[in-house]
Amino acid sequence: MNAIGFRIWLAIALCAGFAAYLPAQTRGSERVDPAEERFIAANEAAMKRMMLDMTIRRTGDIDRDFAELMIPHHQSAIDMARAELQFGRNEQMRHIAHQIIVGHQQQIAAMQVAVNEDPDANGGGAGRQ
């Protein structure tokens, strides 16, 4: 093996060894925690559900339409807060997430009552058609 061949072989060997050392997932030079990937996926799913659920048929009743829009918005916040509780490590953020869950569940129920709906009907939605 000549000197150039040896250098190429050494460079490939070093790159392969270094690549094996790195975690499977990286973002640029930043290592990505698998829990973060699951957290992001949970949040993206919550946002997609929210956007679909916020596509409503207008009723002509501003208050009902407001509830129809806000309930999925609040449910999305609850789903994101649950992801924080599952994957987050900061106790202050986990406490805030818990407060979001409790507060938004109460607000969803209050909106459902305000538009004369059973809070347990329709999976928590405000009268989906």
Image: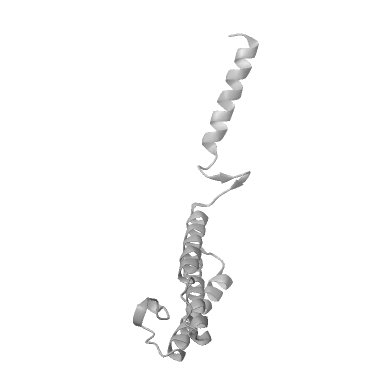
| Residue ID at (41%, 78%) | 125
Q: Position of residue 72 (x, y in %)?
A: 48, 74
Q: Is residue 100 above or below residue 30?
A: below
Which one is nearer the viewer's eye here, 89 or 128? 128
Q: Is residue 67 visible?
A: yes
The number of discs equals: 0
Where residue 89 sits, quadrant-wise, is: bottom right
Q: Is residue 101 visible?
A: no
| Residue ID at (63%, 44%) | 29
The single residue placed furthest to the front in the displayed view is: 60
Would residue 115 be found to the left or right of residue 92 on screen?
A: left
The single residue placed furthest to the left in the displayed view is: 121
Q: How is the image coloured?
A: one colour
Q: Is residue 75 above or below residue 13?
A: below
Would residue 21 be found to the left or right of residue 121 on screen?
A: right
Q: Position of residue 42 (x, y in %)?
A: 47, 61
Q: Quadrant of the N terminus?
A: top right
Q: Position of residue 129 (x, y in %)?
A: 38, 76
Q: Position of residue 74 (x, y in %)?
A: 50, 76
| Residue ID at (53%, 52%) | 33
